Image: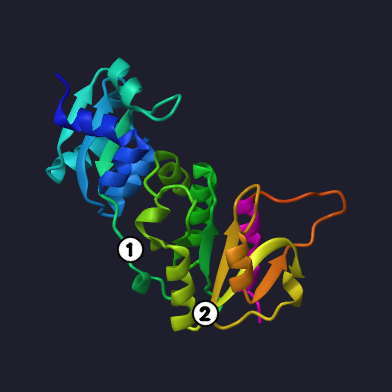
Amino acid sequence: MASSLVTQVRNLQRRKARKRSAAAVAEGVRLVEEVLAADVPVTGLIVSSGGMAHARTAAAVAQATARAIPVEEVDDRLFGELADTDTPQGILAVIEPKRWALDDVRVQLRQPALVLDGVQDPGNVGTLLRTAFALGVPGAILLPGTADLRNPKVLRGAMGATFRLPCVPLADEEFAAWTRREHITVWAAVGEGKPLARAAVPERLALVVGNEGAGVRPFIRELAGTRIAIPLARGAESLNVAVAAGILLYEVSRAD
């Protein structure tokens, strides 16, 4: 009979189950290390028999044990069924990520909020959040259609950023009301926008990047005070959304 921890991991493999739960699965030794370093609440660890042979995995298990976090060892076959990756590293944690509030997102001069508008690919969302955290962004807003923050691929792509960077899912009207209440200017990144170098950066800014194929939705285009773009070389169609966001955030952070 499967243990309660194994059953929980199986349930969390389904998106609908994740929506009903406050828990998530963090897989891989680096991500588990980040979980432990950030003091994220941990329900328990599952490790494979083969994974325990690796020094970093064993060290993470020892750290968890010292904190009285339950650790369950399973055979490699069962771990493969529980893992979300093709080549699992033999360790995962069931965690309860922090639920951030809008008040945690403190927009300041040259520190804009990053807004994800319908960014569907979990890998892109994870990379966007990792980049935002690395560049000193005070928080991220996730609008409808954006991949679930507790998706395992989002967690792996963010590499611990979601444990430290305030990330808040919002409905469209909630986002619009927040920008009005906090006197925040909205910029939308679009292909036909004004070159960033010609735009005066406002004191309080929310930078919106859109869906990988469709771009920013009409609602956000209308809400945006300015539509900006990164000038590309002749013949270049577009940039990956995470790459584009990284360039824009960096340039805004160093603007006069």
**Residue at 54% over, 58% down:** 117
**Amino acid type indicated by mark 2:** Ile
Instruction: Check the image and name the residue furthest to the left.
Output: 68
Asked where in the image residue 182 lies, by quadrant, the reply is bottom left
Q: Is residue 190 visible?
A: yes
Label 1 secondary element: loop
Question: Which circle's residue, 2 or 1, is located before the other in the chain?
Answer: 1
Q: Which mark is residue 184?
A: 2
Q: Is residue 250 magenta?
A: yes
Q: Which residue is denoted by mark 1 in the rendering?
A: 100
Residue at the image point whose x is 49% and y is 51% from the top: 146
Residues rendered magenta in the picture: 241-256
Secondary structure found at label 2? loop
Residue 197: image quadrant is bottom right
Q: Is residue 30 left or right of residue 209?
A: left
Residue 217 sits inside the magenta stretch: no
Quarter of the image where the C terminus is located: bottom right
The residue depicted at 43 percent of the width and 62 percent of the height is 171
The kind of secondary structure the magenta stretch mainly shows is helix
Q: Which residue is at the front of the view, 190 or 253?
A: 190
Residue 138 visible in the displayed image: no
Name the kind of residue labelled 1 in the image: Trp
